[in-house]
Amino acid sequence: MELMIFFLIITAGTLITFFIDDISRKLTGYAAFLTILTGIVYYASIPMGTVWQMHLLGFDLKWMRSPAGDFFAWIVLGLGLLSLMYAIKYMEGKARLGYFYAAFLVSLGAMTGVTISRDIVSLFIFWEIMTWSSFLLAIYKAYYGVETKGIKYILFSSMGAYAMLTAIVFIVHYYHTTDLNTLWQAGAFGFSRHWFIPAFMLFGFAVKAAVMPFHVWAPGVYTRTPMAYTSVFSGAMSKMGIFGMLLIVAGLSRLDIGWIRFILGWAGGITAALATLQAVRQNDAKDLLAYSSIAQLGYIVTALSTGTRMGLMAALYLAVLHAAFKGALFLVAGAVEKQAGTTDFREVSGLIVRMPWTFFTALISVIALAGVPPLGGFVGKWLVYESLITETHSYFLVIVIFFASTAAFLYAYRFLFGLFLGQQEHNTEDVHEASWWMLVPMLVLSLVSILTGVFPGLVFKPAAKALSDLHLPSDGWQMSILHNAWNNGVDTITVGSTIVILFLLTAAFITLKGRKNTRRTGTKDISTSGEIPQPDDNLNFQSGFFQPFERAIGKPYRWSMDRIWTDIGTSLAAFFRFLRKIYTGNAQTYVFYVIVFLIILLLFRKQIF
């Protein structure tokens, strides 16, 4: 009953938040924040192992607070709380706040529901609530471009949902149960007899995790959803796809099935590499982060596909890190957008003096993303490499992943330089730092990136419990060569403390220096070696710095999965228009069809019967 009360708290808070917008728009955000805060406090009080069951329409629904579900539930609730706190000021002055916050709360409740579901019917129900509530937020900004991207998102989500529903139908038909534990024991998720069941489930989860070639919905949705929710979209909702894949991997672990892991691993590797190349060429910070998020999810999918000790541990570790640094970076982009009016590198730059604490968040998050020690990204990527080399011997896949990781430095530099380190534009002279309601969530997420790198046990211990809960190997961290060199000892405390102090001193220096009157320059106020630049010449680093790199790898940029899907849709539309001509509505035509069908049956009756 305790789990049901949690959802009643979220539901009641959602209704209050929606209707309070008609009374006072200023209270709407606070009501949503207090709702999720109350829900978190109550959820934390529920004992581990608490079960709630009911029989509905012939199905046995089962919810349980378990270590595996808890690992992902806290990603959702923690990031959701910080994002709602950020939204209070970010969404200030916006219209339809009741609509926005209500959908926000419903999506958080649904994602939590996915993590506590111990039967596939409950998981599917919460999955659909999560999809539709996030769709409402994806089309919150009402204009044509948003609606088009939203339709693409709901179309691909529907494809994934139908695949999952098909798998559920086969499971009920062949195994006569929907309980996850029973299905693992029966081999339904182990490819023992019916390989298409986990294949359908993996397809549905891969869509939500934006695995190529099913990623085309993500860039548009991530950039056009309000950044307060995009941090959750990228940092938490994508992890529901990872959570689902983990459930399937738990079934695969009971059998030695190499080809499915091979496909999944290379899908993750290709996703990481190609999405990284797309991120490098973006001129807008939001577009860059969207492709970067897809690329980072590719690392997690690759690690998960190994099914090995270090691979599984790396996947869960990177799931937390990705939620922290990518959530922070989307919040940074939202802060720049609100304060400067745009996130286009060609229109805004040099904000390090104007927004020093936002820059501090961006710097920490970019370092974590790039995998530079001693922040968490280094530990996670090292485990991925070590798993692929020593446990699965996937040397070519290591090369692909390493290329993606190295190329990530390019877009990380572009993001940091483009918004903060370039020459300051004259039209940004009046820009000032974001509200502390927005800064605190960003700084907290930055602190997570630091602490999880210096003290990886903060993540590895709950990750080990989660893997044990699914009967998967949980000693991956102890097997890594980093274990003895990177433990919670005096050295790491000293290094971590020194890094924090240096960053804080740097941020304080930038803040104090920014108060002095300094000469302002624009992006084109640079030396041209005596040449006279023309009015249309764009000489700034933000837009042309990577042109040689783009020319060197021009072929991948000519590929467009979005165009391929569009062509498939166009072909299907033409085929259906042809079929429409067959169904004329004329009764005589239909009688003719019946006669032709009967003649075919008579001619081939021996072969058919």
Image: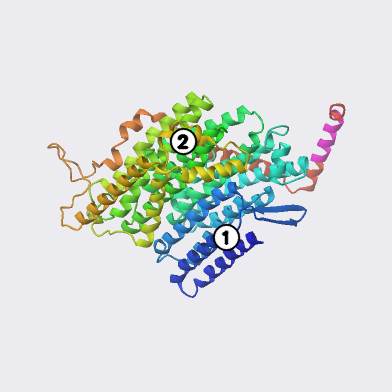
Q: Name the residue under label 1.
A: 45
Q: Residue furthest left?
A: 530
Residue 515 in the image: above or below residue 161: below
Among numbered discs 2 and 1, the one appearing first in the sequence: 1
* Residue range corresponding to the magenta coloring: 593-603
Q: Residue at x 41, y 59 (%)?
A: 86
Label 2 secondary element: helix
Mark 2, mark 1: which one is toward the viewer? Answer: 1
Give the CA distance from mark 2 to mark 1. Answer: 39 Å
Whether residue 507 sits left or right of residue 457 in the image: it is left
Q: Residue, x 44% and y 26% (percent of image)?
A: 399
Q: Where is residue 355 in the image (x, y as percent from the top left)?
A: 29, 55
Residue contact between numbered discs 2 and 1, judged by CB atoms under 8 Å:
no
Predominant SS along the magenta part: helix
Is residue 605 in view?
A: yes
| Image position, residue 515 (x, y; %) | 19, 58
Residue 145 seen in this snapshot: no
Q: Which residue in the protein does label 2 denote?
A: 272
